Image (cartoon, rainbow, N blue to C red):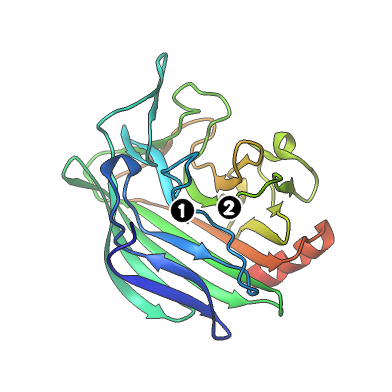
Amino acid sequence: MTGGDTTVLRVAGRPVARYVTRPELPARLSPRPYLHPVTTLAGTAVTELSPADHTHHLGVGVAVPDVEGHNFWGGRTFVRDQGPTELDNHGSQRHVAFQLRDEDGFVAQLRWMAAGAEVLRERRTVAATGLTDTAWALDLTFSLTNVTERLVSIGSPATNGRPGAAYGGFFWRARKEATAPDVFTPATEGEARAHGRPADWLALAGATWTLVFAGATEQTRRDPWFVRTGEYPGVGSSLAYGERLPIPPGQTAVRRIVTVVADGRLDREQAAALVRKAVTP
């Protein structure tokens, strides 16, 4: 399934993530570059690749279910008044080149292709930074530029008629364990209260690990979080929560998510402190 070129990210010499640029995947999974496995500094894996419950979940990356009707998420497409439907509308993200590549990060260019044409061009910047002896941060920025001569808009199942399913953008498929992880933000606890709401940061705590996701720009902080813990463990951003996100010709939509990857179960105070350290220039 991996195939192609890969890059290993390291923190203080320890491998913490592998980035696969050209995965060999069937079209219905919307082939795209991804990070997997991502691990804590102690070596605990905190991502899953193509799990049985959602084979189109590919570690950590950028996935969008509706770009002008093209599916860059994988799996079925939600059709208004019809529901999840198998369609031949899958796009793919094609790695073009690394503009910079070191052991602690890279800058890559990607082409979002659908029906034989380029719809979006992406500049993706990823960096791995040590925070403490038990925590590091994955900093991911993606910039989507409309390279067509017409307006391109990004949607979600929510904007297409499925309430609460506003996934699309940054997405992290986390490690599935016997017990669902806990989720909390600076002011709330639990999936029901965290899902669909913006928050400066959101934490997902498993048996021996914690992930803390933070929007690192004003626009990113305004995006509501997409959260799942009961059905499966996953956290993402919502580019199109209440309405479609338009990108005019030549314009660019930019988002930046910084994720703290920690060994152990953090409390609210510890999570907030690590986020401050990870996001502060």
Q: Which quarter of the rendering shows the C terminus?
A: bottom right
In the depicted view, which residue is nearer to us: 123 or 250?
123
Residue 264 percent location from the top left of the image:
75, 65
SS type, badge 2 = loop
213 to 164, vertically: above or below: below
Answer left or right for 152 relative to 255: left
Residue at the image position 77 percent from the left and 60 percent from the top: 265
Q: Earlier in the sequence, mark 1 or mark 2?
A: 1
The residue identified by callout 2 is 174
Q: Residue furthest top?
A: 81
Residue 198 in view in this figure? yes
Location of residue 210 (image quadrant): bottom right
44 to 190, vertically: above or below: below
200 to 139, vertically: above or below: above
Q: Residue furthest left?
A: 116
In the depicted view, which residue is nearer to us: 11 or 43?
43
**Between marks 1 and 2, how big is the CA–CA gap?**
9 Å
Could you tell me the amino acid type at mark 1? Leu
Location of residue 211 (image quadrant): bottom right
Residue 15 percent location from the top left of the image:
52, 77
Residue at the image position 71 percent from the left and 68 percent from the top: 263
Q: Residues within 10 Å of mark 2 (few under 14, many from 20)?
A: many
What numbered label is drawn on residue 188? none
Residue 186 percent location from the top left of the image:
78, 51
Answer left or right for 267 relative to 63: right
The residue identified by callout 1 is 49
In the depicted view, which residue is nearer to us: 84 or 65?
84
Could you tell me the amino acid type at mark 2? Ala
Residue 280 in view in this figure? no
